[in-house]
Amino acid sequence: MALKKLGKQTVKFINPPSIISTASIVGPKEGEGPLAKYFDTILGDDLCGQKSYEKAECCIFKDAANLAIEKAGLKKDMLDYMLGGDLLNQIITASFAARDIGVPFFGLYGACSTMSESLSLGSMLIDGGYADYILCITSSHFSSAERQYRFPLELGTQRTPTAQWTVTGSGGAVISTMGNGPYITHVTTGKVIDFGIKDANNMGAAMAPAAADTISQHFKDTGFSTKDYDVIATGDLGSLGMELTDDLLKKEGFNISDIYTDCGVEIFDSKKQDTHAGGSGCGCSAVVFSGYFYEMLKQGKYNRIMLVSTGALLSPTSTQQGESIPGIAHAVTIERMV
Amino acid sequence: MALKKLGKQTVKFINPPSIISTASIVGPKEGEGPLAKYFDTILGDDLCGQKSYEKAECCIFKDAANLAIEKAGLKKDMLDYMLGGDLLNQIITASFAARDIGVPFFGLYGACSTMSESLSLGSMLIDGGYADYILCITSSHFSSAERQYRFPLELGTQRTPTAQWTVTGSGGAVISTMGNGPYITHVTTGKVIDFGIKDANNMGAAMAPAAADTISQHFKDTGFSTKDYDVIATGDLGSLGMELTDDLLKKEGFNISDIYTDCGVEIFDSKKQDTHAGGSGCGCSAVVFSGYFYEMLKQGKYNRIMLVSTGALLSPTSTQQGESIPGIAHAVTIERMV
């Protein structure tokens, strides 16, 4: 059998999976941002009625999962698989949510790249003939992430200008052999790239080389150029990481400036909302894609976009042991029609 | 296109991937156990010449990856993908190793079920036509796991009789469209199952219901019976979890006692080695499969086995917040010939 691969890192689907529904649930701060009207649910309270932020995040994940399933017109037991993850240790959000959703589950961890990782693997499972319906979903929560990765919120630690604000939210998409688009047509799977950044408060810089590497590889593998895309959206590089990615790609001979944005830049009004370099987290590209970009594709405002969720592969332990922060980025091409 | 699914949770491959090489590296304690002669490398020092146990684990992972690639007669850049994970927060072992190996990487987290999770997804990617060569690999390390999940070793905390001993080791397999077996013919993907166990020192009991659920579902989906298998091996339930799984399956009408074992029971001589209920960890089923079972299949001593790596989906935080411990188990059928 001939491989369905283009070049080194890209797959082109013969039966492109259709994204038949999406769901997005966000916290109050995200609900005050510029994309507010595109989200399905804006929480009034980021504790979601729970006793801890971890339990709250799980609740948001489950609600987003159930909403995506409902909007697809399905029952839970019609799902063949759920693929997803989150940022918390041992991906407890996704695992505990999967317990309640009760379908075969593949847990993923790609830091903030997990949304496009789940769409990538999910698409191969649909196109390959292993499933009719797959839920791809991730989440993050500002308060659970801050205390796990940085400082307890109660400490009131001052944030650096390069710091980003973890998005509270969960976004999911049901992909299927059926439906009439938008379709996932290509995936370009990232390598782990490390330029030696060691500042855990500057994730954008740590992830930018991986984003640039995956995007340029995508162009090389597919023969697409920037003219073939309406938008290229990285996951959560923020304003600094976005600038670096743009520069790195220019050095590679690809000028994407006109069509380039970042989900972390789009989700907040950084100046008004004091989010410094922008949004971040597994939930960032998940809700911006599931809310905003999916709607733009459905409405026909965009015909072809590339979603490039970006992950910083660090742990507090690796940082304490002097390690630098490698990044990874997975690209997914989504087209209105095929 | 007709789905390649059998029943609810099982996939049967049309082009079963061949496991063309495996590699297993273990620590000194594992090297004193009954399976010692089947491992490729037994470390003299579980620090592996590194300054921390986390760095040591990464080193073991990389060495196992390189050895599997070399034994397959490949160069790194011939791999289409690497799929894998480990137990450390943010799967730093796999992520940092992937940085050096430099191939497209999908990070997975299924706790100790990750080895069969990686073989499951990897097989779908091979059979589906997305790759010619995939490395599926996981690791664990006693000392890095103890301090992350339980207590610093320096504290000398007494272990309960139900406790297990995390295997220090890494096992990997290169699967391919080419080669002449053994072959991965079926995968049964597990659901997250929770019987309400809250004792983090009794993981075997927490994971047993998931193992029983996946094994019984596999029989229902495929029509196979215990007569069709030479061995069914769970991942790391240990002696207690194994007994519970056996009992649960009998209640479901499946008596697997004669062909049933557990990688965590096989790897240590519990009485002599003071490992209580047996071995555990992501590396446990990885090295026992890559070392022992792969060799038994190659030699023709077994014709068809089922590997059911089992994961306990907890974090210290979830336990502190009063959550029970859900489990998950993924089954992979491996046959000498197809």
Image (spheres, coloured by chain):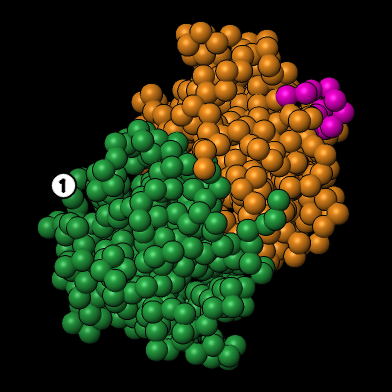
Chain colours: A orange, B green
- The amino acid type of the residue labelled 1 equals Gly
- Could you say where residue B225 lies in the image, as x and y percent from the top left? 52, 82
Q: Which residues are magenta?
A: A291-304
Please tell me whether residue A302 belongs to the stretch shown in magenta: yes
Q: Position of residue B29 (x, y in %)?
A: 19, 67
A291 up-or-down from B67: above or below: above
Q: Is residue B316 left or right of residue B279?
A: right
Q: Residue at 44% x, 54% y: name it.
A: B17
Residue B71 visible, this orientation: yes
Q: Which residue corresponds to mark 1?
A: B49
From this view, report whether residue A111 is shown above or below residue A261: below
Q: How many badges with numbers are in the image? A: 1
Magenta includes B68? no
| Residue at screen point 63% across, 55% down | A130
Residue at the spot x=44%, y=33% of the render?
Answer: A191
Near mark 1 (Cα within 10 A), the count class, few <14, some 14-19 or many ≥20, is few
Q: Is residue B122 left or right of residue A288?
A: left
Q: Residue at x 52, y 50 (%)?
A: B127
Is residue A44 in view from this perspective? Answer: no
Residue B311, image x and y in percent?
Answer: 48, 66
Farthest residue to the left: give it.
Answer: B44
Element under disc 1: loop
Return the chain for callout 1: B
Name the residue nearer the viewer: A315 or A73: A73
Q: Quadrant of the C terminus of chain A?
A: top right
